[in-house]
Amino acid sequence: MLVTQTSNEERIVLEIINEKIKSFAVSMYVYIEEQIERSFTNIDKILQFAKGYRILIEADRNSRFKTWHDKITNSRGKLLEEYLSSRHFHIINVQSEMCTFQNGRGSSKIDVTITNNNIIADVHEWELREKGSCSEHNYFKYKIGKANKYKNKYNYQGIIYVVNEEK
């Protein structure tokens, strides 16, 4: 069901109830000319609305960072990574030779999939799909559910810090 209280032209928020478990799925876009900090306020609104529930966000953030396997880090990516860490979000993107975005001017990994602690253990098999997209962005594909064979082994609900040492 569309959540009209938090959806607008830049983001779509859906409430999904499956087997009595409520989750929120979000698709977001941040214009490259927009100050990325403004989008943090929008995410905070979603967090407040969906407090205590499972949240998965697909976002074209127009930001680059090595944490989500891009070649470079830009200032927007650094700010986004710091914000996500401060809100205890997890980045689901896995290493891939494919980029999330590509056009005639270049390619990059500016799109990111993030989750909160309440759903991280149930998201698995994330991958990029090139075929079928009518856009300059590739599709993401992943599974959500209890079929995650690693759930019991890696079901850590605390804070996870990602530290990259530049060499």
Image (cartoon, rainbow, N blue to C red):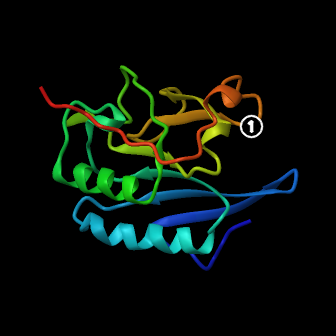
Name the residue at 74% across, 65% down.
1
Name the residue at 68% across, 68% down.
2
* Apparent side of residue 80 relative to residue 50 in the rendered image (left or right): left
* Apparent side of residue 48 relative to residue 153 in the rendered image (left or right): left
Judge whether 27 appears above or below 126 on screen: below
Asked whether the viewer can see residue 107, the reply is: yes
Q: Nearer the viewer, residue 135 or 139?
A: 139
Residue at the farthest right position: 19
Asked whether the viewer can see residue 103, the reply is: no
Residue 131, x across and y down, in percent:
52, 26
Q: Which residue is mark 1?
A: 145
Judge whether 148 appears above or below 57 on screen: above
Please identify the quarter of the rendering in which residue 24 is found.
bottom right
Residue 123, x across and y down, in percent:
63, 37
Judge whether 7 appears above or below 161 on screen: below
Name the residue at 38% across, 42% down.
161
Residue at the farthest left position: 167
Badge 1 crowding class, 10 Å Cα cut-off, few under 14, some 14 to 19, many 20 or more, is few
Residue 120, x across and y down, in percent:
60, 42
Looking at the rendered structure, the kind of residue marked 1 is Gly
Please identify the quarter of the rendering in which residue 73 is found.
top left
Name the residue at 61% across, 30% down.
154
Q: Nearer the viewer, residue 131 or 40?
A: 40
Q: How many marks?
A: 1
Q: Secondary structure at mark 1?
A: loop
* Apparent side of residue 145 relative to residue 33 in the rendered image (left or right): right
Residue at the farthest front position: 158
Q: Nearer the viewer, residue 77 or 149?
A: 149
